[in-house]
């Protein structure tokens, strides 16, 4: 009886030891990048995950006038070590914003992150009630494993379950390629004209106006050079015309002299007769 009881206790302990780590979530480092309120992000809770810089640039450019997100180079993260997650609460009660302390963990095939509410509007007007937070999630979990290749979704919530929203990672690349992390803004400029034509035009007004004075001096010498070049090209023909005129004058003088001499010779011959 005692042996059976001891065996049962050992089995229970073994199951607890083996099953505990399998059910516990592995911590993942999460660092907030930006927070605030923005109605254009939607009315309901949503989560968007950007695995590469190209994905992030495409999304921020598609917002047009509502684009308040910094460029990837201004974020406190890098896509070779982190991924970005954008959580939007949608239409909220107002008078509060999402806190900066975010706890994330990976279990099974889902990364789950939770945040808390903070009183205030994070610098937005008092009537703002569309909170969002941009979070950088490390690609490496606390135990040193890479969770992204086996992840299928990323879920974020703020305190209560009714604020939960998930994003699917099906088909997302596990790591950014060289073309995704270092593309010159062709990757950002190709989608930009579709939705961010207005902000791009607005920002380009200042450079174009400041550039026009610098272009004026360069165009002035070009026009001066162009105006001088026809004169230089026309000067040789004028010299040739002058030489032709001189030759004609000399020929006429010689002909006149010859006629004078001829008339004198003829007049003398007439007198001798």
Image: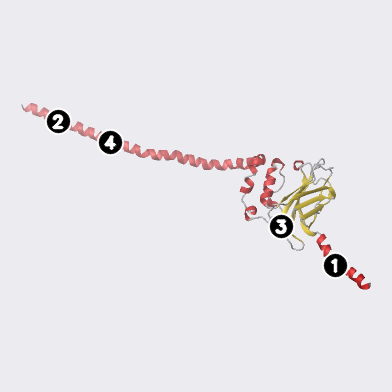
Location of the C terminus by quadrant is: top left
The disc, 3 or 2, on the residue closer to the chain's N-terminal end is 3
Is residue 76 something one can see in this rendering? no
Which residue is found at the position 32% from the left and 36% from the top? 241
Looking at the rendered structure, the secondary structure element under dot 1 is helix
**On the rendered structure, is 153 left or right of 249?**
right
The disc, 4 or 1, on the residue closer to the chain's N-terminal end is 1
**Cβ atoms under marks 4 and 1 closer than 8 Å:** no
The disc, 1 or 2, on the residue closer to the chain's N-terminal end is 1
Distance CA(mark 4)–CA(mark 1): 122 Å
Which of labels 4 and 1 is toward the front?
1
Say which residue label 1 marks: 14
Tell me if mark 1 has few (under 14), some (14-19) or many (20+) residues whose alpha carbon lies within 10 angstroms of its own: few
**Cβ atoms under marks 3 and 4 closer than 8 Å:** no
Above or below: residue 79 compared with residue 257: below
Tell me if mark 4 has few (under 14), some (14-19) or many (20+) residues whose alpha carbon lies within 10 angstroms of its own: few
- Which residue is situated farthest in the bottom direction here? 3
Which residue is found at the position 76% from the left and 52% from the top? 154
Above or below: residue 6 compared with residue 163: below
The disc, 1 or 3, on the residue closer to the chain's N-terminal end is 1
Say which residue label 3 marks: 149
Say which residue label 2 marks: 262
Distance CA(mark 3)–CA(mark 4): 94 Å
Colouring mode (rainbow / by chain / secondary structure / one colour): secondary structure
> Which quadrant of the figure has residue 252?
top left
* Residue 201 x/y as whole percent: 64, 40
Location of the N terminus by quadrant is: bottom right
Residue 50 vs residue 221, the one in the foreground: 50
- Which residue is situated farthest in the left direction here? 273
């Amino acid at each position: 009886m005692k042996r059976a009881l001891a065996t049962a206790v050992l089995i229970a302990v073994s199951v607890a030891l083996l099953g505990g780590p399998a059910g516990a979530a592995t911590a993942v480092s999460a660092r907030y990048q930006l927070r605030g309120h923005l109605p254009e992000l939607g009315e309901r809770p949503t989560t968007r995950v950007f695995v590469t810089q190209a994905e992030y640039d495409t999304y921020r450019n598609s917002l047009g006038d509502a684009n308040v997100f910094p460029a990837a180079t201004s974020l406190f993260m890098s896509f070779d070590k982190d991924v970005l997650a954008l959580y939007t609460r949608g239409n909220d009660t107002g008078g509060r914003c999402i806190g900066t302390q975010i706890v994330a963990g990976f279990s099974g095939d889902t990364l789950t992150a939770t945040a808390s509410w903070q009183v205030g509007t994070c610098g937005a007007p008092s009537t703002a009630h569309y909170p969002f937070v941009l979070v950088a999630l490390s690609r490496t979990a606390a135990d040193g494993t890479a969770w992204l290749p086996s992840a299928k979704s990323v879920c974020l919530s703020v305190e209560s379950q009714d604020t939960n929203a998930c994003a699917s990672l099906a088909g997302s690349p596990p790591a950014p390629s060289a073309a995704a992390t270092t593309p010159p803004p062709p990757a950002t400029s190709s989608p930009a004209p579709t939705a961010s034509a207005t902000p791009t035009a607005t920002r380009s007004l200042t450079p174009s106006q400041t550039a026009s004075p610098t272009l004026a001096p360069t165009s002035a010498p070009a026009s001066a050079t162009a105006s001088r070049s026809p004169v230089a090209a026309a000067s040789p023909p004028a010299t040739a015309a002058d030489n032709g005129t001189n030759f004609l004058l000399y020929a006429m003088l010689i002909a006149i002299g010859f006629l004078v001499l001829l008339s004198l010779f003829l007049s003398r011959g007439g007198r001798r007769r």
